[in-house]
Image (cartoon, rainbow, N blue to C red):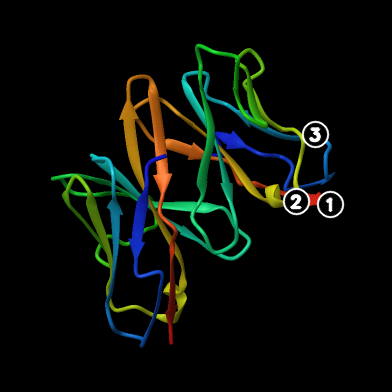
Amino acid sequence: GAVVSQHPSRVICKSGTSVKIECRSLDFQATTMFWYRQFPKQSLMLMATSNEGSKATYEQGVEKDKFLINHASLTLSTLTVTSAHPEDSSFYICSARLLAGITDTQYFGPGTRLTVL
Amino acid sequence: DQQVKQNSPSLSVQEGRISILNCDYTNSMFDYFLWYKKYPAEGPTFLISISSIKDKNEDGRFTVFLNKSAKHLSLHIVPSQPGDSAVYFCAASLTGNQFYFGTGTSLTVIP
C-alpha cells in the first residue's frame, strides 16, 4: 500500500517555542493532505485540510495562526505549532489522500508525539 | 454532528471466532467507505474499503459488508487473532470530498 511518513516521531520542546512536523507521501502524489490530533483514549480530530498550492482549510475551533500548515509540493505538507504551550501536547497524525478511479483512500503517517514542557 | 457512528466502544472476542464491528452513517450521499486499524501511539492503517456500488468486499480474513438501505456497514474478521486487538475506525466519504470518521471500536481478541 501507499506509504506516508512523518518526522519527527517524537518531539519535546519548551513552552513558547515553535515546532515543525513534516508529512510526506513517499510513493504517490497527494493533492490533499489532512492533519489530525488525537487526545488519549479519544478519536481522531480533524484539524485542517491541506491542498497543494493553496491555503489550508481549518476546522472550527482550530486556530490557523497557531497551527500553520504549508503544502508546498504534492508530496510534502508541514504543520508548525507556533508558540507551543503544554495544552498543545498531543499526538499529531497526518494523512495523504490517494484518488484513483473510484477508490478514494487516506493513508496515514505514523504520528508525532508532541510534549510541551 | 456525527455523520458516522460506531455505537460500540469496545468488543471482546475469543481467538478463532468471528469479530463483527459495526458502523452506521446518516448521509445517504456517501459513496465510499473504509475501515482502519489503529494501535496505540501509531497512525491508523488502512484495512479495506468498499464503494457504494458494491455490497461486499473481501480481503483475506477481512470482509466489509455494506447495507445502503440501512446506512450500515460492518467489518467481519474471521478467524480473529490476538494481533487483531486494536481500535478500528470506520470512515465514509463523498469521493473527492471530506472524510468522516467514527469514534472507533476497541477490539480485544482473547487468546
Q: Report in which chain the residue with disc 3 lies.
A: B
Q: Report in which chain the residue with disc 2 lies.
A: B
Reading the image, the residue beneath label 2 is B82
Q: Residues within 10 Å of mark 1 (few under 14, many from 20)?
A: some
Residue A79's place in the image compared with A25, above or below, is below
Determine the secondary structure under disc 3.
loop
Residue B52's place in the image compared with A22, above or below, is above
Reading the image, the residue beneath label 3 is B18
Task: Give the x, y percent position of residue A69.
Answer: 24, 58
Residue B104's place in the image compared with B58, above or below, is below
Q: Does residue B30 show up?
A: no
**Kind of residue at disc 1:** Ile
Task: Give the x, y percent position of residue A92.
Answer: 42, 62
**Mark pair 3, 1: CA separation:** 12 Å
Q: Does residue A25 show up?
A: yes
Residue shown at 54% from the left, 13% from the top: B54
**Kind of residue at disc 2:** Pro
Callout 2–callout 1 Cβ contact below 8 Å: yes
Viewer-proximal residue among A64 and A26: A26
Viewer-proximal residue among A8 and B59: B59
Please determine if labels 3 and 2 lie on a single subunit: yes
Callout 3–callout 2 Cβ contact below 8 Å: no
Q: Report in which chain the residue with disc 1 lies.
A: B
**Kind of residue at disc 3:** Ile
Reading the image, the residue beneath label 1 is B110
Please determine if labels 3 and 1 lie on a single subunit: yes
Which quadrant does the C terminus of chain A fall into?
Answer: bottom left
Whichever of labels 3 and 1 marks the residue nearer the N terminus, that label is 3
